[in-house]
């Protein structure tokens, strides 16, 4: 697809769009290739399915578009989406969508070394508030009542990621197999909680305003669905246990008190207060599940790298090496329980 082809397509699909000048691929991101578009009419972002053979239900850019469109007036900060191109009608034969570019800050290290202590606390507080607001969205009112399947979310997700993991590896890691077995045996009863869950709620999936601790937009909604709100909370709280080094940094070994960062227990308590919850039960299960699910996702990234279809092959290989690290952290929670 040439620049002229894309310009012609977008000029016809988006009323305001005029004269595409440059297309630049963002270096970050593993699942769906993402590009910055500079045009006379403004700056945009195009997010596309990757080329090659894809795993079932993966790279759902159409779901990303739908959920961001639905959240536009809910108070949950999302970029404005402008157009969805379906595969058959797309000029490159792959589905993609276009949204407005949001200038601002992305923080890659959860310890936030570039900020002062009070600013760090504020960043974590607005992330917590946004997560609670997301889980309070009335999904029927925003047209997302059919956005997920009924029944036990964690049972469905365990089945999905178990199968995705097996499809991504030639020889399963014994630790991953043990985790799958443990999760199946510890599955909580369905408590009926249903919310819109992001699926990848973490610091570097958010753009913050350039000059204030406020979220301009939450990105990467590919894994969003209707599910259990504790899945999002546990997913973010993995960050408290991951080592503060390498390509997938966490807060493990960081002196959170000196830096002004909340503890895991404090973050959970703040979320519970915002949502009117007395307590959070079955926390070890939720946390182990979060580690397992991320490990299964990264195993798929590594598989795409081996096949030559990863958006960022070098990073994909490094993320594949993180799978046993995540499995080891999950086993640690199983053996010892969360440390808060």
Image (cartoon, rainbow, N blue to C red):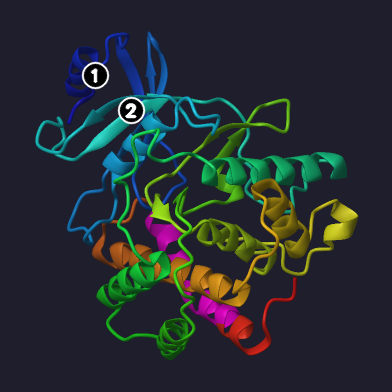
Task: Name the residue: 44% across, 44% down.
Answer: 220
State yes or no: residue 52 in magenta: no
Compared with 38, 188 (above or below) is below
Comparing 267 with 79, the one in front is 267
Q: Are marks 1 and 2 in contact (CB under 8 Å)?
A: yes
Height in image: 166 above or below 46?
Answer: below
Helix, strand or loop at mark 2: strand
**Secondary structure at numbered mark 1:** helix
Q: Quadrant of residue 6?
A: top left
Residue at the spot of label 1: 10
Instruction: Give me the residue at 65% from left, 28% from top.
Output: 209
Q: Is residue 262 above or below residue 20?
A: below
Relative to 75, 257 lies left or right: right
Q: Is residue 286 left or right of residue 178?
A: right
Question: Which residues are drawn in magenta?
Answer: 312-330
Magenta: main secondary structure equals helix
Residue 63 place in picture, x, y as percent: 31, 43
Q: Is residue 319 magenta?
A: yes
Q: Residue furthest right?
A: 258
The answer to whether 300 is drawn above or below residue 140 in the figure is below
Asked if residue 14 lies left or right of residue 340, the reply is: left
Residue nearest the observer in this picture, 260 or 45: 260
Residue 32 in percent (x, y) is at: 34, 46
Question: Which residue is denoted by mark 2 in the rendering?
Answer: 98
């Amino acid at each position: 697809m040439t620049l002229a082809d894309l310009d012609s397509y977008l000029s016809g699909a988006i009323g305001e769009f005029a004269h595409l000048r440059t297309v630049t691929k963002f270096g970050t991101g593993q699942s769906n290739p993402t590009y910055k578009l500079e045009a006379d009419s403004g700056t945009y972002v195009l997010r596309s399915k990757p080329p090659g053979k894809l795993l079932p239900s993966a790279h759902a850019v159409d779901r990303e578009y739908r959920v961001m469109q639905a959240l536009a007036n809910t108070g949950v900060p999302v970029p404005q989406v402008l157009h969805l191109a379906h595969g058959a009608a797309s000029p490159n034969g792959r589905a993609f969508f276009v949204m407005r570019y949001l200038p601002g800050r992305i923080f890659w290290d959860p310890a936030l070394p570039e900020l002062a202590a009070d600013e760090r606390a504020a960043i974590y507080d607005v992330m917590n508030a946004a997560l609670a607001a997301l889980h309070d969205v009335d999904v029927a009112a925003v047209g997302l009542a059919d956005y997920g399947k009924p029944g036990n979310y964690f049972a469905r997700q365990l089945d999905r990621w178990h199968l995705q993991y097996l499809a991504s590896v030639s020889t399963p890691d014994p630790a991953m197999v043990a985790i799958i077995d443990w999760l199946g045996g510890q599955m909580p009863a369905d408590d009926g909680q249903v919310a819109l869950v992001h699926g990848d709620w973490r610091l570097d999936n958010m753009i913050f305003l350039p000059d204030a601790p406020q979220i301009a937009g939450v990105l990467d909604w590919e894994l969003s669905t209707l599910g259990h709100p504790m899945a999002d909370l546990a997913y973010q709280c993995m960050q408290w246990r991951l080592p503060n080094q390498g390509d997938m940094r966490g807060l493990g070994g960081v002196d959170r008190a000196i830096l002004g960062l909340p503890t895991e227990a404090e973050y959970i308590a703040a979320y519970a207060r915002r949502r009117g919850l007395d307590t959070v039960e079955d926390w070890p299960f939720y946390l182990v599940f979060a580690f397992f699910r991320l490990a299964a996702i990264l195993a798929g990234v590594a598989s795409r790298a081996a096949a030559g279809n990863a958006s960022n092959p070098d990073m994909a290989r490094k993320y594949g090496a993180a799978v046993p690290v995540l499995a080891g952290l999950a086993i640690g929670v199983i053996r010892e329980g969360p440390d808060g």
